[in-house]
């Protein structure tokens, strides 16, 4: 039975000189408060503040990173808690946990393994490495540990040192849970919404027409016309801002950001609303609406985030059977320079406008994002995301972006997480990689240790706090 442990120098450089500098830098940022300006947590976690009940659901079924890796090993989705088993019943938590323990070795070298080890050691107080032999014992120990008050959602918020935490919410959301939390005198944290309008600006969404109707209902504005549609979106942005939102997030793929003339936009909108739009109409409307979102952001000051370059729900049959967010969102090559030229020509130098670019195609860091960010004052590079949210990929991004745009043009780490339990682990990894990169510059006499430490503090805490206006 092997022992589970966390090495204090994990992810630091192997050379003695660089490792010493990394230790010194990390010591100054390890305990800084966490700013999480973009994530996907359910605010209901903090409203109810109920304990997490099952280790398997918490650490396996609800973590699409882990689901993806185990499915790749041939584990059927029902055996991971998604859908019914052949017998018609659902796998219980113990059975799911046994699958993780049986395939623990398959996670070696992955960021998921790093995060899980951190969570199991620091939060669950587990000291034995998961294996088939320890599966039942560790499951029982973690299940009992989850019932303790210091692992409830609000206690974890405090334990992680969260300064602010954000959710991502559809444009039609009433934000009732945020309001309930804000009205709770026992809640001492900050949970802010993020405005996500994809479902009402993407004509390819299967419920586009119904979503437009819902947008009209919640805004109280008739969306049967293009003018009304735009007014309804502006109204919803104001509604979100009134409840603390400082940023908007956009994931609709675009190949252009050319604006349509008002009359043409109205005609295209009318066809799309009736379900009669052509593929060309869809592409033109998507690009036009991203530009409209930039116009609104320049007006109201909400930070604009662009998460594109992913084919979501890649296997339609599996998505229909097991749902979204099961690990089958896959990257494709994305182009920024020419696509964003119309938008950036209009708003790239606008005072108060901020646009954060994320990518899952790391070739764009040096080829496009770095050069663009190094010129436009409104533009910032988001951290490596999804498949690139890994130590070596993060290090490569630091090199590509740091050399071209400078570290001050990076947003800092944005965890984009669906797991409250994993926030501490995610930021720990990002801060260690940051310390290691800056330690290399110190060892090469490109930075002093003092300046490197200041840059690390900016990356870990100050910049996301200031950039996202939280």
Image: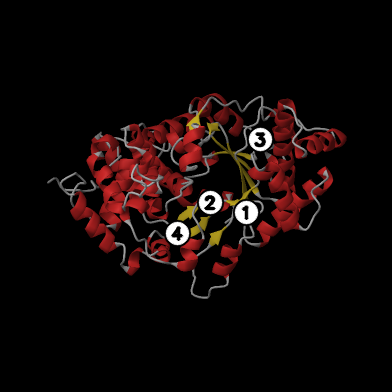
Q: CA distance from mark 4 to mark 2?
A: 11 Å
Q: Position of residue 104 (x, y in %)?
A: 25, 40
Crowd rating for badge 1 (residues with CA inside 10 Å; few <14, some 14–19, many 20+): many
Q: What residue is shown at x 26% (from left), y 58% (from top)?
A: 142
Earlier in the chain: of badge 2 and badge 1, it is 2
Which residue corresponds to mark 2?
37
Q: CA distance from mark 1 to mark 3?
A: 27 Å
Crowd rating for badge 2 (residues with CA inside 10 Å; few <14, some 14–19, many 20+): many
- Tag 2 near tag 3, CB within 8 Å: no
Please give the label number shown on residue 463: none
Residue 352: in sight, yes or no? Answer: no
Identity of the residue furthest to the right in this view: 263
Q: What residue is shown at x 65% (from left), y 44% (from top)?
A: 199
Q: CA distance from mark 2 to mark 1?
A: 9 Å
Q: Position of residue 272 (x, y in %)?
A: 76, 36
Q: CA distance from mark 4 to mark 1?
A: 17 Å
Q: Is residue 174 above or below residue 310?
A: below
Which residue corresponds to mark 4?
162
Which residue corresponds to mark 3?
204
Q: Secondary structure at mark 1?
A: loop
Q: CA distance from mark 4 to mark 3?
A: 37 Å
Earlier in the chain: of badge 2 and badge 3, it is 2
Earlier in the chain: of badge 1 and badge 3, it is 3
Crowd rating for badge 4 (residues with CA inside 10 Å; few <14, some 14–19, many 20+): some
Which residue corresponds to mark 1?
246
Q: Position of residue 126 (x, y in %)?
A: 22, 55
Earlier in the chain: of badge 4 and badge 2, it is 2
Crowd rating for badge 3 (residues with CA inside 10 Å; few <14, some 14–19, many 20+): some
Identity of the residue furthest to the front in this view: 87
- Tag 2 near tag 1, CB within 8 Å: yes
Q: CA distance from mark 2 to mark 3?
A: 28 Å
**Which tag is nearer the camera, tag 2 or tag 3?**
3
């Amino acid at each position: 039975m092997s022992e589970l442990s966390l090495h204090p120098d994990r992810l630091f450089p192997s050379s003695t000189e660089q490792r010493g500098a990394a230790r010194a830098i990390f010591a100054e940022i390890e305990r800084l408060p966490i700013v999480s300006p973009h994530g996907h947590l359910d605010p209901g976690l903090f409203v109810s503040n109920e304990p997490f009940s099952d280790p398997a659901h918490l650490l396996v079924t609800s973590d699409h990173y882990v689901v993806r890796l185990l499915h790749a090993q041939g584990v059927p989705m029902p055996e991971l808690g998604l859908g019914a088993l052949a017998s018609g019943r659902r796998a219980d938590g113990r059975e799911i946990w046994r699958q993780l323990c049986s395939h623990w070795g398959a996670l070696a070298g992955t960021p998921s393994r790093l995060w899980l080890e951190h969570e199991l050691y620091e939060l669950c107080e587990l000291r034995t490495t998961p294996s088939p032999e320890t599966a039942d014992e560790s499951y029982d120990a973690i299940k009992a540990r989850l019932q303790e008050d210091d692992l409830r959602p609000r206690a974890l918020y405090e334990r992680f040192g969260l300064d602010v935490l954000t959710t991502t919410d559809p444009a039609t959301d009433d934000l009732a849970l945020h309001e309930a939390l804000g009205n709770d005198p026992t809640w001492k944290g900050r949970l802010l919404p993020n405005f996500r309008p994809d479902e009402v600006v993407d004509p390819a969404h299967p419920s586009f027409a119904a979503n437009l109707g819902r947008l009209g209902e919640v805004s109280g504005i008739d969306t049967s016309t293009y003018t009304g549609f735009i007014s309804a979106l502006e109204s919803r942005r104001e509604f979100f801002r009134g409840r603390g939102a400082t940023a908007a997030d956009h994931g609709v793929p675009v190949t252009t950001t050319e604006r349509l003339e008002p009359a043409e936009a109205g005609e295209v909108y009318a066809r799309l609303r009736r379900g009669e739009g052509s593929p060309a109409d869809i592409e033109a409307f998507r690009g036009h609406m991203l530009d409209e979102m930039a116009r609104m952001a320049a007006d109201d000051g909400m930070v604009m985030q662009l998460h594109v370059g992913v084919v979501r729900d890649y296997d339609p049959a599996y998505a229909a059977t097991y749902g979204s967010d099961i690990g089958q969102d896959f990257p494709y090559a994305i182009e920024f320079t020419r696509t964003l030229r119309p938008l950036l020509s209009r708003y790239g130098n606008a005072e108060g406008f901020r646009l954060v670019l994320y990518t899952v195609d790391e070739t764009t860091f040096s080829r496009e994002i770095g050069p663009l960010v190094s010129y436009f004052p409104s533009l910032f590079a988001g951290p490596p995301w999804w498949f690139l949210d890994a130590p070596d990929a993060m290090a490569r991004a630091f090199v590509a972006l740091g050399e071209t745009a400078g570290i001050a043009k990076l947003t800092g780490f944005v965890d984009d997480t669906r797991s409250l339990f994993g926030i501490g682990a995610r930021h720990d990894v990002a801060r260690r990689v940051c310390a290691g990169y800056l330690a290399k510059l110190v060892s090469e006499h490109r930075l002093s240790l003092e300046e490197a430490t200041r840059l690390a503090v900016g990356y870990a805490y100050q910049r996301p706090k200031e950039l996202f206006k939280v």
